[in-house]
Amino acid sequence: MAAVYTSNLVINTGSSFSQTFTLEGNDDSAFDLTGYSVTSQIRKWRGSTTATDFTTAIPSPASQGKILLSLTPAETATLTPGRHVYDVVITLNETKELVVEGSVLIREGVTR
């Protein structure tokens, strides 16, 4: 994997959120994530010291290359509306690789 994929997200405050990504290897087949761990965070800007961690998972079987990001309604309720950034990092044997990045639009509803 050498390419970093860009995908922009929209999250509504107070709602559940989930997004699945499928990683592909150099031969366009699913990237085997067996043995990997995954982390992902939202920040207002890249240098911000405050972050919100996504709940992350690699659904079984890991050989399908899928990564799941999610947030509960309680977690999205704490997000500040506006534009943010996020990325997804996979780790194998202490080697980290950025695989997805993009912007996140946090939207606050009007009706209470």
Image (spheres, rainbow, N blue to C red):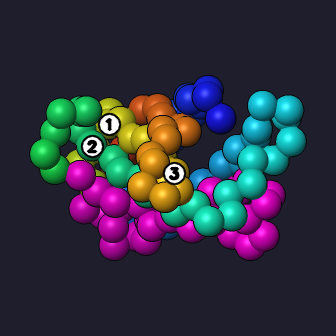
Label 2 packing within 10 angstroms: few (<14), some (14-19), many (20+): many
Q: Is residue 99 above or below residue 58?
A: above
Marks 3, 2: nearer the viewer: 3
Residue that lies at the very extreme toward the left in this rendered image: 49
Quadrant of the image for the N terminus? top right
Left or right: 59 with respect to 78?
A: right
Marks 3, 1: nearer the viewer: 3
Question: Element under label 3?
Answer: strand
Identified at 76% across, 40% down, the residue is: 24
User: What segment is highlighted magenta in the picture?
Assistant: 51-78
Q: Position of residue 57 (x, y in %)?
A: 57, 67
Q: Position of residue 76 (x, y in %)?
A: 36, 61
Q: Is residue 49 above or below residue 46?
A: below
Q: Is residue 93 above or below residue 57?
A: above
Q: Toward the viewer: 59 or 16?
A: 59
Disc 1 to disc 2, C-alpha distance: 6 Å
Q: Which mark is first along the chain, 2 or 3?
A: 2
User: Residue 43 shows which numbered tag?
Assistant: 2
Q: Toward the viewer: 66 or 95?
A: 95
Q: Which residue is mark 3?
A: 90
Verify whether residue 81 appears in magenta. Answer: no
Question: Element under label 2?
Answer: strand
Left or right: 59 with respect to 110?
A: right
Give the quadrant of residue 100.
top right
Disc 3 to disc 1, C-alpha distance: 21 Å
Q: Which mark is first along the chain, 2 or 1?
A: 2
Q: Which mark is first along the chain, 1 or 3?
A: 1
Quadrant of the image for the C terminus? bottom left
Amino acid on which the number 1 mark rests in the picture: His
Disc 3 to disc 2, C-alpha distance: 18 Å
